[in-house]
Image (spheres, rainbow, N blue to C red):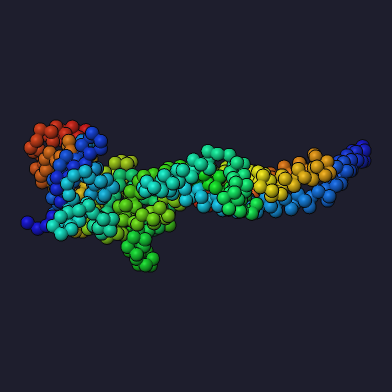
Amino acid sequence: MKTPKIRFDKVTKRYGELTVLDSLDLDIAPGEVVAVIGPSGSGKTTVLRVLMTLERINEGVIWIDGEPMNRMRQGDALVPASQAHVRKLRSKIGMVFQSFNLFPHMTVLGNCIEAPIHSLGLPRAEAEARAEGLLAKVGLADKRNHYPSQLSGGQQQRVAIARALAMQPEILLFDEPTSALDPEMVGEVLEVIRELARTHSYTMLLVTHQMGFAREVADRVCFFEGGKFVEQGEPNAFFTQPQSPRAAQFLSKVLQAG
Amino acid sequence: MNTVRISALVGAIAFLVGLAFATFSELKVFLPALLKGLVVTLQVAGLSFVLFLFCSLLAALGRTSANLALRFAAGIYVEIFRGTSLLVQLFWLFFVLPEFGVVLTPMTAAVLGMGLNFGAYGAEVVRGAILSVPRGQTEACIALNMPEWKRLFRIVLPQAFAIMVPGMTNLTIELVKATAMVSAVTLVDITSAAVKQNLIHYRTVEIFLITMLLYYCLCQVVRYGSKLLEVRVSRYRGALN
């Protein structure tokens, strides 16, 4: 088998007494789009957060392209990773947050060129050209000089997607990207993500409550509960004939609700 | 009828002008001394303001740092300078340090004392502002792989700055007025000059009225400056309105 793009190897994350990720295993192939679904508060988001290094894990190893991320090789042993090692691997990952987290004191364009200039060291002109291309792609070229507070939620989230893409990541993480949006704005954001999944080779990991969307864009659906993936499978099979009673119960509830 | 009114008005004005003239006739006797005091007050206030900002920022960064030693050192600084009296700190700098062979000029002692003292209060204002920048901003920086110091200076501090302006303005106004304490280290500032002139000329009302006005004007300058700054740094926040 090819080296997985992302591998979780017995990853455990605890908050005090509470175990959120319980010896979690997961392999994601390059270019695969994986949707993580499950009940609220089950810790699905934590799967993305530990991968983005926003949280430390207690046990296990996360691998990116066959390289350990929270560890590094020293001879045959794996030792805790240095800051430089983490930064190197982290540069392959981009993340889109539920609450956008745009920089409010910078314009739309400023948001999109900030990290390319100050993290990648790109010249300003090149960063701007790249950012403008991406803003056009998410349909916001005319908003380049606006501040985030002047945009709707859907527009802000599209800027956040452009900002993440400007770093040219190979892996994209979406953490409930439409949960903070008014219903009429969900569509425009999903359309952008759908387009990315269809036309690019990004490896995508998507936490979502939009079952229809997960079914449509994902190559695989993972049902997460109690710190583990209880069931995973091809979307159509999973949504029509879930194997585990828990997944079946969950699906009947959310699909009923509509 | 009109002429009566006009002459009454003119008379009243002439009376008030005469009264003011009589009251302030000796203005030129003590005013130069007060203005000299004003220059000293401005020097102390200006220099200690710079030190105050520097100490506030440095100590706040220390107290919010991940490094235990830095947090501890900054915490000790804040506790010492906030927990003891400014007047006693000035006495220490000017009268006690020479016992250990460190001799400071009155101006140096005054600026150090004021700057360090107010810096301890300012550190808490700045720390509060830094902590009130949403956690999501830091997380976005991590996700964008920004180096830690750029995260601080380009993302967190600019947003904290808008939050800290009102609190720091309060402290700056307080600092301007607290310069009245520096007579303790033999500097002749406005207040000290006023006390001296009063002993010589006994024009108590005029001297202290003018002294009060001078402080009031200084504080108005601070207030106005702060207002301009606040509009500037928080423009993005009001962009929607």
Q: Can residue A15 be seen in this view?
A: yes
Q: Is residue A138 left or right of residue B58?
A: left
Q: Is residue A36 in sight in this rendering? A: no
Residue A243 position by quadrant: top left
* B109 on left or right of A141: right
Q: Where is residue B194 in the image (x, y as percent from the top left)?
A: 76, 45
Give the quarter of the image for residue B209. top right
Left of A117 or right of it: where is B182? right
Residue drawn at x 17%, y 57% is: A73
Taking the image as shown, residue A11 lies to the left or right of residue B20, namely left
How many circles with numbers are drawn on the protein? 0
> Which one is nearer the viewer's eye here, B24 or B101?
B101
- Note whether A87 is above or below A124 in the view shown: above
Q: Residue drawn at (39%, 51%), measured in percent from left and top? A: A103
Above or below B170: residue B154: below
Q: Position of residue B86 (x, y in %)?
A: 59, 42
**In the picture, which quadrant includes the N terminus of chain A?**
bottom left
Residue at (38, 54) in percent of width and height: B151
Q: Quadrant of the C terminus of chain A?
A: top left
Q: Residue B159: x, y in percent?
A: 45, 49
Identify which residue is drawn at 34% across, 60% down. A119
Q: In this view, does A105 lie above or below A181?
A: below
Camera-nearest residue between A158 and B229? B229
Residue B37: x and y in percent read 72, 50
